[in-house]
Amino acid sequence: MQNIDFFLYVCYNDGIERLQYLFTKRRCAVKKFTVLFLFILFFALVGTVGAQQEDHYHLSSLTVSSGEGALSSGIFASATIQNNNTKLIFEVCSSFVQAMYGKQVGDFFIAGSGGAFDNTPWVGPYVVYNPANWISLTTWEGASAGVDKHPDIKHIQFYFAYNNLRLNYSVLYLQWSLIHFQKDVPNNLPGGGISLPLGKYTVFAGCDYSLRDHKPLYSAGVTAAF
């Protein structure tokens, strides 16, 4: 029995070390995830051309934006693959890659999410309550293996909490976001902007203001619906 226990102990620690090694390749991890995102998007586009039936997954929207916001900075891309009320969402920017998989249940979109931010893996629930076109509430939380830039599969801990209230009126919107990241001071970000539909495209631009850092955050982008 002692030999078996020792063998299991060695296998466990070797497995942990291998996972940590994979998560600490900081130079190439985000690039590899980005390439994976592009491959997935390519096959989604091919599938969309080949099958637009209701019982098939298809690319329903693609978003590209730039700037700063509560959750991202720099160039950001998002693709939504949908089958009736079920959605698979991929998102990527210079510092993270993440995905959500969930279903619309009445006025709620309920999903599980996971990804890697600065090469630190995390998972958590994502919920959007949208009782009417003019209002939506989002809550999103994550737990990580280690801390930012220092992944450690042995230490699971709180990573982030994000809450957002958005009010829409015609092409204008107002919103308030609250984000708490690791041990940072929570940040309140009031903001607003414009979202202008142009056929199958929607062009948007907005500004959030960081009350913690005392600076505006500007962003703009376009969404294509398929």
Image (cartoon, helix red, strand yellow):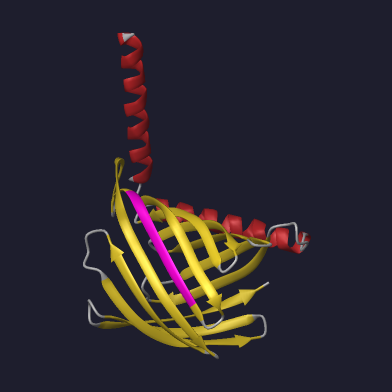
Tell me: residue 14, above or below residue 57: above
Lateral position of residue 86 relative to residue 195, left or right: right
Q: Position of residue 72 (x, y in %)?
A: 39, 69
Tell me: residue 167, above or below residue 74: below
Q: Position of residue 35 (x, y in %)?
A: 52, 55
Quarter-wise, where is residue 5 in the image? top left
Tell me: residue 182, above or below residue 179: above
Lateral position of residue 41 relative to residue 13, left or right: right
Q: Position of residue 188 (x, y in %)?
A: 29, 76
Residue drawn at (54%, 64%) of the image: 109
Please state, as top left, top right, bottom left or bottom right, where the N terminus lies in the image.
top left
Lateral position of residue 115 relative to residue 24, left or right: right
> Mainly helix, strand or loop, the magenta region?
strand
Quarter-wise, where is residue 54 in the image? bottom right
Quarter-wise, where is residue 115 in the image? bottom left
Q: Position of residue 52 (x, y in %)?
A: 76, 63
Residue drawn at (67%, 85%) of the image: 199
Please state, as top left, top right, bottom left or bottom right, where the C terminus lies in the image.
bottom right
Q: Which residues are magenta?
A: 136-144
